Image: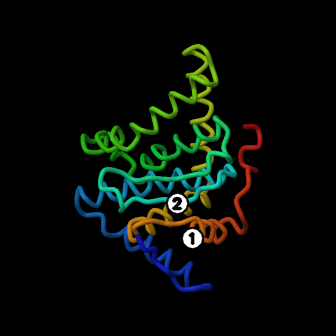
Amino acid sequence: MVGHRLPDGDGEIVLYTALALRHHSVVTSTNDLELWAKTHHEAGHAVIGLRLGIRVCRVAALEDPSGGTTAWDKRTVTPKREIMLLLAGAAAQARCFPGFQTTHVGQALVAFNASEDERRIDELLQQLAPDADSRSAIRTELATRVESMLDDPVTWETVRVLAGVLASLPFVGEDLLLRIYADKFGGTPNAEADSSS
């Protein structure tokens, strides 16, 4: 698949913002809700991954009709950071339309989009803790940290902008991800947000 070239320089960020705003204002059907939930889910993975110092290589929401994908370099991740990256998808999706998660369609979307993530989270928790209580405590701690990161206005705005871009382009590669991140955070990703994992 051929990638999309966007204008260089300051005009590029204006384009991202315009794409994001356009998609925030046109959610009128179940298909729009599904797309917006999927793009927020994948954007949540990507932005939190970058905040944790994980090298996120590619994000797609339109290419795969059954669900989106976020690809990251496994060499740049610890089990706890990977769990946080995985939890961030459902957490961002839940924030995109407050209250939507309690509807039948919303619950179905969460269950569908998070099923692969949940399988991987369970595998990683099994590696980290021998008993169910310890795994539950680790998951709760990491989920709380993800929610705290998403509470940061710059992080959430970055998720929303990336979700808008993902609603317009078949995929976003590493270069464009890093440009969006740098525009919002004023620099390159590092693991400052989670130096303990």
* Residue 75 picture location, percent across and down: 67, 46
Which one is closest to the eye, mark 2 or mark 1?
2
Describe the colour scheme in one phrase. Answer: rainbow
Marker count (numbered): 2
Q: Residue at x 62, y 61 (%)?
A: 154
- From this view, report whether residue 62 is shown above or below residue 81: below
* Residue 101 picture location, percent across and down: 35, 42
Q: Residue at x 73, y 55 (%)?
A: 190
- Please state which amino acid type lies under the numbered disc 2: Arg
- Please state which amino acid type lies under the numbered disc 1: Leu
Q: Residue at x 49, y 66 (%)?
A: 172
Q: CA distance from mark 2 to mark 1?
A: 9 Å
> Residue 60 versus residue 153: which sits nearer the camera?
60
Which structural element holds mark 2?
strand
- From this view, report whether residue 30 is shown above or below residue 134: below
Are the residues tagged 2 and 1 within 8 Å (C-beta)?
A: no
> Residue 35 versus residue 100: which sits nearer the camera?
35
Name the residue beneath numbered marker 2.
Answer: 58
Quick check: 96 left or right of 50? left
Q: Residue at x 62, y 71 (%)?
A: 179
Q: Bin the neighbour count of mark 2 within 10 Å (Cα to Cα): few under 14, some 14-19, many 20 and up.
A: some
* Residue 156 picture location, percent across and down: 55, 57
Name the residue beneath numbered marker 1.
Answer: 176
